[in-house]
Image (cartoon, helix red, strand yellow):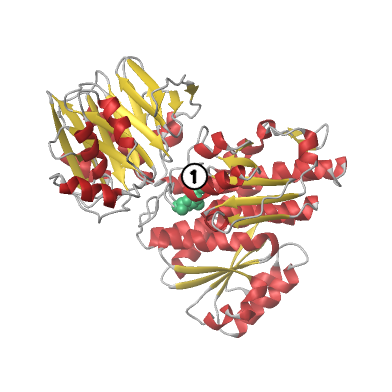
Amino acid sequence: MCGIVGYTGPRQASRILVEGLKRLEYRGYDSAGVAVQDHGALAVIKKKGKIAELRAAVPRDMPGTCGIGHTRWATHGGVTDANAHPHLDASGKVAIVHNGIIENYGALKEKLEKDGVRFSSETDSEVIAQLIARLYEGDLERAVKSALRHLKGTYGIAVIHADEPGRIVGARNGSPLVIGVGDGEMLLASDVTAMLAHTRQVVYLNDGEVVSMTPADFRVSDADDNPVDPKINEIAWQLDAIEKDGFSCYMEKEIFEQPESIARAFGGRLEPEYGTAKLGGLNLSRKELHAVERVRVIAAGTSWHAGLVGSWLLESVTRIPASAELASELRYRNPVVEANSLYIAASQSGETADTLYAMREIKRRGGTVLGICNVVGSTIARESDGGIYVHSGPEIAVASTKAFTSQLVAFYLLTLTLARMHDMSHHEGILFMEALKSVPEAVRKTLLLRDRIQTIAKKYARFRDFMFLGRGILHPIALEGALKLKEISYIHAEGYASGEIKHGPIALVSPEAPSVFLVPGDQLREKTISNMKEIKARGGPIIAVADEGDAEVVSIADDCIPVPKVDPRFQPFTMVVPLQLFAYFTALELGRDVDQPRNLAKSVTVE
Ligand code: G6P
């Protein structure tokens, strides 16, 4: 969602803050700002628009070595300079940046206004600054703690005071904050990518904790002032993993990284000797795993699509009933949490509020939840009972691509593990493993189709409505293809099960509404071909993604993308990549901002 960065040390703060914000821009990008301490006062610069606008507004020689910055994704109040963070209190002594939502800000604001406090923005966040200023009696940490007692809602905040040079106070409840421990300097950010250029030593703050830092030191405590022993973690990500590396944008880079990221996701986790997978982080004994009678995935967006593929595969291969549900729905429907059900929270960021809260609800009811996450140390990863890191490396583009295929790998590994405990023979396990090992090469070959896919994308870029159709394990891939196109090109696209089109969506078919068909390599191929003919008979243009050499499909479709033939259970990998490229090239053709599409945010930490 929004991004926070703070710096205190010997160096010029503004530069480090703006660079950090640039790294965080993918989290939210409608406005940004910095506040820096300078000789007993606070200098604030904030701007509507992208970080580039802020960068242009910040003087190169802006003095000050301690400050905080923020990149915003609006929740309360329109996108204006005044609503951008940091927010100052009325006296200009306290500056805060805030991620999350203060639910009782209306009542707090009313009370403060009655007491004569004048507000200068429409945001919920400003009440935090005003409240801290009112409670300040010469100790910022204490004032922050007192203020937090009045707040209801979620927050990750960073605060500075004009009278406390070099000090930053941070607090977290539901919105991530990470401390960066440098050599004679300290950082605070909502995301490690903002600090990777300066330090790899980080401490993750937990909900309810407060940090007070100076260049030389930091102290973590809980709301009641009990000290918390901080655990320092070493970040493995390399700085070049968050550079564009010669690609025009992050999404392009991330699509093309997939042969490597997929291989990384299963690297070191296959046991040929036993024809199974080795998942060290599950924290479940073989006995506990064997007792699993049902698997339920909870997730949002693209991760939900990975969960749909995963649950389809799990059930068909292991014969353990499995399903995937939208986290935002599960939490409020008073779910039955059965003993012997295994829950899986799938989330690239590990911070998605919907998924996190659904997971907590299940845990409160005694359920076991595993996390399938990309971001190491993220909240879902830390609060789950165990899990599988997908190791796709940092994913910066808002539209998820490589994290999706890596999440798929995690589900394939879990499937193999569970299947081998039940009906799958050693030999079948080896075949499954070999099929998985061949995926990176098949994806690499699929990526070679880029020029062909770009030509097709150019041809269809001006159409306003698309249908994406798939069956079986490819149905979620159709949903994902439609989502990718919507997200970055703003073209209306619907994903449907191809067998379902005759029950309604076929009414949309016309020469102006192309259908993208995913042709399965199994017994559903014939049925899919019949569905294609139904569309064709009604004048609908067809783009087909099918196994190479499928002449029949080529003869029916207007355009065909032939992908390498793989075991049909592994087709989600070869089929999703052309759809990612199709969305990417379409967005490019339409001149869209591929990495930072309008209205979206990478990690949605509000409900
Ligand atoms: C946001 C992003 C999506 C993402 C979803 C779930 O909506 O824009 O791309 O799929 O969140 O994110 P997660 O980090 O939980 O996978």
Front position in the image: 172 or 535: 172
- Residue 355 against residue 23 in the figure, above or below: below
Which residue occupies 59% across, 56% down? 334
Which residue occupies 15% across, 44% down? 115
- Residue 515 against residue 282 in the figure, above or below: below
Front position in the image: 100 or 305: 100
Residue 266: x and y in percent read: 66, 37
Give the labeled residue for mark 1: 254
Is residue 200 shown left or right of residue 322?
Answer: left
Front position in the image: 221 or 580: 221
Front position in the image: 188 or 117: 117
User: Can you see residue 87?
Assistant: yes
Q: Outermost residue toward the bottom?
A: 538
Rendering quarter of residue 316: bottom right
Residue 82: x and y in percent read: 18, 49
Is residue 274 shown left or right of residue 162?
Answer: right
Circle 1 packing at 10 Å, graded few (<14), some (14-19), many (20+), is: many
- Residue 261 against residue 6 in the figure, above or below: below
User: Can you see residue 565?
Assistant: no
Rendering quarter of residue 211: top left
Residue 235: x and y in percent read: 48, 26
**Amino acid identity at mark 1:** Glu
Is residue 58 shown left or right of residue 108?
Answer: left
Is residue 142 shown left or right of residue 174?
Answer: left
| Label 1 SS | helix
